[in-house]
Amino acid sequence: MRIIDVHHHWVNEADYLDRLLEVMDQLEIERVGLLALGTPFRRLFLTQPEPVGCCDNKELAKAICNRRERFFGYGFCRLGTDGPDLIDWFADNGFLGVKFHIPAWDYDDDRCFPIYEQAAHHHLPCLFHTGVFVLPESQPGQRLSSRRCHPIMLDPIASEFPSLKIIIAHLGVCWGEEAATLCRIYPNIYADLSGRVDGWISSKSIDWFKEMLYWPQAHQKILFGSDVHYSEMETTLRRQRDIFRQLGWSSQQIENVMCNNARSIFGF
């Protein structure tokens, strides 16, 4: 079975992408969607004392240029800081999606809609962080708030831009019921189950997943995402596959989650 990982951070470690490619080959992961969120996330997932460099949008644009058959990039856009022109830059530089995180405005703030309109114009799927978050390093003065990342705020965006593909990261974490309901109701909303095995998923029983993903077409709205250091990808992949099997999904339905849904969204 071929696999597409729609949610993976480029960690600030030497030769990280080379090591990631080795793991991808071992696990038969065809493509990985890369995120490079810059300074606030420099220490995210580090397995060494200090970060090497600082991966950001410009670095990611260079990295994916010659590896498009294995990597695709999300441009990082911070709502309240960046404008629609950044979305144009993403489209011009080969990015296939947009990542929204640490917003200074609520996701459904009217001031954000020109950015979403531009993403829809360029056919760039949008991956929204949802759920409570804490950055690797504190950001005094930023007034960061997890409340701005509630999945219900994606409701008016999906309605306003029905052609815009929206991915809810982490199935909303603590707001899983709202996230799953949005996936069920809106044709253009999907979700990934990304996150460490000892993170939010560890608190959820299989009965919880059965309750959230109860409708017959749920397998068409869920995506595989890792959102871990490459050294934890195998464990994360195994855990998510186990969830899908316990849900009673067929091999074809699991293949939809692992690759076919992503192929449809990103046009592979």
Image: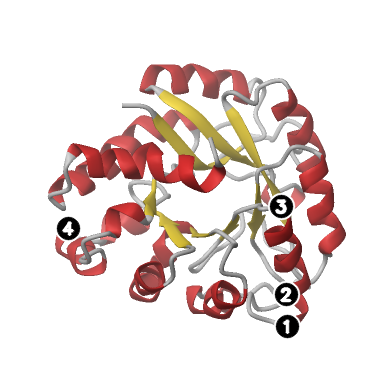
Q: Are marks 4 and 1 in contact (CB under 8 Å)?
A: no
Tell which of 102 and 259 is nearer to you. Answer: 259
* Vertical relation: 178 (above or below) 193: below
Q: Which residue is mark 1?
A: 110
Q: Residues within 10 Å of mark 2 (few under 14, many from 20)?
A: some
Residue 14 occupies quadrant: top right
Q: Amino acid at mark 2?
A: Phe
Q: Which residue is mark 3?
A: 76
Q: Which residue is mark 2?
A: 113
Determine the CA span between mark 2 and mark 3.
16 Å
Nearer to us of marks 1 and 3 is: 1
Identify the residue at horizontal 35%, vertical 30% (top origin).
234
Determine the CA span between mark 4 and mark 2.
37 Å
Q: Earlier in the sequence, mark 4 or mark 2?
A: 2
Q: Are marks 2 and 1 in contact (CB under 8 Å)?
A: yes
Identify the residue at horizontal 19%, vertical 60% (top origin).
205
Q: Earlier in the sequence, mark 2 or mark 3?
A: 3
* Secondary-structure class at tag 4: helix
